[in-house]
C-alpha cells in the first residue's frame, strides 16, 4: 500500500491548484490547465485511501479558489469590513469551492482503480463533468469554477461549447490530464506498459484536436459572415464609472444624472438600443424624479433604453431592468432571478451584521420569476440578465431556447474596483455567447462593458475604471437564426455524465458487495 504522504506531500496539489488559477483573467496562462490537474490526479491515484485523495483534492481546490478569488478579500476590505472578517469570508468561500475538487479526487480514486487502465482517463472526465453539472445548482457562482473558463484566450477551442455546452471543454481537459497522469505513473514500469500508457494520451489529444478543428472551421465561417454582413441596428452601451461607495448617497444624485446626460450628448444613431448598467438610477424607479428624468432621456435620444433600476412591484422589492420606449413609457420590466448573497440579501443578518461593514446597509430584495417575457428591441428579441446571472449557463440556455437572439447583461462591478473580478465576470459572457450563439451586450457601471458576438469574440469593449460610451453597429443578418445545437438540445453532456457516474458508482458497489 502506498505510504501516506503527510502534510508535506500536499504541497504539490496546492501549488498545482494555485497554478490553475493563473489561467483565468487577468493572468491568462491558459496552457497550465492542460497540466495542473494532472498533478492532483496522479496524487489521488497514489493515495492510500479515498479519504487521503479527498484531502489532496480539497487542498488543490482551496488553492485554486483562494488564488482565483483573492479579490473577494479585497472587496470586503473596500466595503469597510475588518481584516479578520474579510479573511474569514475569503477562507469560507475558498473552502466551499474546494469541496468540489475534494469530492472529485476521492470519487475518481475509487472509480478509476476499478476501471481498465485505458478507460481511466474517461472515468475521471465523466466524474468531473457530472460534478460540474450538478454543482451549477449548489455552489456559489463566481465565474471561476467551470474548467472551460481556463481557455478563454483560445477562441477556436471554446467553440465546442455551441455543441455540448459549458462542460464540453472541461471534459476534454480532464481526460487529457488523467491520461498524462497515467503516462507519468507508468514511466518506471516495463517498457511495454509505459508505451501503452503513452498511447493512452492519443485519444484525449485527438479529441482536443477535433475540438480545435471544429473551432477553426467555425471561426472561418465567422470571417465569411462578417465579410458579407450588412450594417444593422446599433447597440449604444453606457459606462458611467460611478464610484460604488457614493452610488447610494443622495447628495451625489445630481452628479450621477449629469454623468449620464454627458454620455448622451452625442446623437444616438437611428434604430438603436441604449443599454445602461445595473441599478443605474440614483434611487428607486418609482421615485417621480427618477422616472420622469429617465423618460426624458429616452425621448431626447429618440431610442428605447434598457435601464437598470431598483423597483417596487406590488410590494416586492426587485433589482430590475426596465425597457423605456422613446415616448417615455416603460414597456417591460425584468426582475432579477438569482440574487447575490451579501449584495442583495444578507443570510443570517442578525448574527453577522456587526461584522460586514457597509454591506449591512443593503436591503433584502425579492427574486423575480424563473421565466419572464423576452423584450422586443431594435437588436432583436432580447433577454435581460443582471450582474452575476451571466455565470449561470442554464439561465442563458433557457432564454435562448425561448427565442432570445441577444443577451443584455446589465451589471455593476464597482464593488471590485480594478481587481481580477471584473475581468472574470466579463469573460464568462463570451462563453454564454458561444453556447447559445447569441450576441451579448454588456453595460457595466465601472467596466468591463462591451459587445460580444455569437462566436465569443469581443468586438468592442471599454476598460475597467473608465467612463465612456460604445456605439457598436450590429449586423443586419442573424448568423445563427436557429441558435446553437446546445440551445436546441439542452445540457445532454452534463446529464449523460451524471448517469454514467451513477453507473460507475453502482459497479463499484457491486464489486464491494
Image: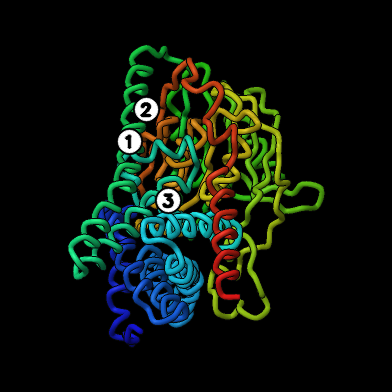
Residue 73 sits in quarter: bottom left
Q: Is the residue marked by circle 2 packed among few (<14), some (14-19), or many (20+) residues within 10 Å? A: some
The residue singled out by tag 1 in the image is: 156
Q: CA distance from mark 2 to mark 1?
A: 8 Å
Q: Does 439 sit left or right of 346 as displayed? A: left
Given residues 456 and 419, the one toward you in this image is 456
Q: Are marks 2 and 1 in contact (CB under 8 Å)?
A: yes
Residue drawn where x is 61% and y is 77% of the image:
353
Q: Nearer the viewer, mark 3 or mark 1?
A: 3
Q: CA distance from mark 3 to mark 2?
A: 20 Å
Residue 442 is situated, as x and y percent measured from the top left of the image, at 47, 39
**Dot 3: what SS?**
helix
Q: Does 321 sit left or right of 469 as displayed? A: right
Whichever of labels 2 and 1 marks the residue nearer the N terminus, that label is 1
Image quadrant where one finds the N terminus = bottom left
Whichever of labels 3 and 1 marks the residue nearer the N terminus, that label is 1
Examine the rendered structure and indicate whether residue 6 appears above or below residue 232: below
Residue 219 is situated, as x and y percent measured from the top left of the image, at 33, 28
Q: Does 497 sit left or right of 474 as displayed? A: right
Q: CA distance from mark 3 to mark 1?
A: 16 Å
Residue drawn where x is 45% and y is 82% of the image:
84
The residue singled out by tag 3 in the image is: 171
Residue 473 is situated, as x and y percent measured from the top left of the image, at 42, 22
Residue drawn where x is 48% and y is 55% of the image:
126
**Dot 1: what SS?**
loop
Using the image, tell me which numbered label, if any, was put on residue 218. Answer: 2
Q: Is the residue marked by circle 1 packed among few (<14), some (14-19), or many (20+) residues within 10 Å? A: many
Amino acid at each position: 500500500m502506498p505510504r501516506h504522504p503527510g502534510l508535506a506531500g500536499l504541497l504539490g496539489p496546492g501549488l498545482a491548484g494555485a497554478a490553475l488559477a493563473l489561467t483565468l483573467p487577468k493572468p491568462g496562462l491558459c496552457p497550465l490547465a492542460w497540466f495542473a490537474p494532472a498533478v492532483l490526479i496522479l496524487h489521488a491515484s497514489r493515495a492510500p485511501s479515498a479519504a487521503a485523495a479527498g484531502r489532496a483534492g480539497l487542498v488543490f481546490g482551496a488553492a485554486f479558489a483562494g488564488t482565483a478569488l483573492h479579490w473577494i478579500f479585497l472587496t470586503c476590505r473596500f466595503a469597510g469590513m475588518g481584516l479578520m472578517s474579510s479573511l474569514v469570508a475569503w477562507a469560507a468561500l475558498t473552502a466551499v469551492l474546494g469541496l468540489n475538487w475534494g469530492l472529485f479526487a476521492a470519487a475518481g480514486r475509487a472509480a478509476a482503480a476499478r476501471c481498465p487502465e485505458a478507460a481511466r482517463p474517461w472515468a475521471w472526465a465523466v466524474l468531473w463533468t457530472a460534478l460540474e453539472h450538478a454543482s451549477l445548482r449548489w455552489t456559489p457562482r463566481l465565474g471561476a469554477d467551470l474548467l472551460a473558463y481556463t481557455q478563454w484566450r483560445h477562441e477556436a477551442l471554446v467553440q465546442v461549447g455551441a455543441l455540448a455546452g459549458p462542460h464540453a471543454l472541461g471534459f476534454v481537459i480532464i481526460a487529457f490530464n488523467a491520461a498524462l497522469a497515467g503516462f507519468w505513473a507508468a514511466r518506471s514500469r516495463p517498457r511495454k506498459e509505459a508505451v501503452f500508457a503513452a498511447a493512452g494520451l492519443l485519444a484525449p489529444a485527438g479529441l482536443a484536436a477535433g475540438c480545435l478543428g471544429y473551432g477553426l472551421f467555425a471561426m472561418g465561417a465567422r470571417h465569411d459572415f462578417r465579410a458579407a454582413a450588412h450594417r444593422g441596428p446599433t447597440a449604444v452601451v453606457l459606462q458611467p464609472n460611478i464610484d460604488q461607495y457614493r452610488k447610494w448617497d443622495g447628495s451625489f444624485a445630481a452628479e450621477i444624472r449629469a454623468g449620464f446626460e454627458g454620455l448622451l450628448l452625442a446623437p444616438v444613431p437611428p434604430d438603436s438600443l441604449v443599454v445602461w448598467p445595473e441599478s443605474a438610477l440614483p434611487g428607486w424607479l418609482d421615485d417621480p424624479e427618477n422616472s420622469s428624468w429617465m423618460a426624458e432621456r429616452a425621448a431626447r435620444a429618440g431610442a428605447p433604453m434598457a435601464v437598470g433600476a431598483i423597483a417596487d412591484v406590488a410590494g416586492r422589492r426587485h433589482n430590475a431592468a426596465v425597457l423605456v420606449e422613446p415616448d417615455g413609457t416603460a414597456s417591460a420590466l425584468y426582475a432579477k432571478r438569482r440574487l447575490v448573497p451579501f449584495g442583495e440579501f444578507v443570510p443570517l443578518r442578525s448574527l453577522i451584521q456587526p461584522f460586514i461593514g457597509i454591506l449591512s446597509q443593503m436591503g433584502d430584495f425579492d427574486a423575480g420569476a424563473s421565466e419572464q417575457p423576452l423584450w422586443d428591441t431594435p437588436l432583436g428579441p432580447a433577454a435581460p440578465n443582471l450582474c452575476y446571472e451571466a455565470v449561470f449557463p442554464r439561465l442563458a440556455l433557457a432564454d435562448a431556447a425561448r427565442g432570445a437572439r441577444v443577451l443584455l447583461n446589465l451589471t455593476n462591478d464597482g464593488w471590485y474596483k480594478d481587481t481580477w473580478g471584473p475581468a472574470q465576470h466579463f469573460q464568462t459572457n463570451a462563453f454564454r455567447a458561444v453556447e447559445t450563439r447569441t450576441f451579448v451586450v454588456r453595460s457595466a457601471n465601472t467596466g468591463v462593458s462591451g459587445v460580444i458576438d455569437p462566436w465569443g469574440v469581443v468586438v468592442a469593449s471599454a476598460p475597467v475604471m473608465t467612463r465612456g460610451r460604445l456605439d457598436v453597429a450590429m449586423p443586419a443578418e442573424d448568423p445563427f437564426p436557429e441558435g446553437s445545437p446546445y440551445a436546441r438540445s439542452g445540457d445532454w453532456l452534463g446529464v449523460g455524465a451524471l448517469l454514467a457516474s451513477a453507473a460507475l458508482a453502482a459497479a463499484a458497489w457491486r464489486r464491494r458487495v
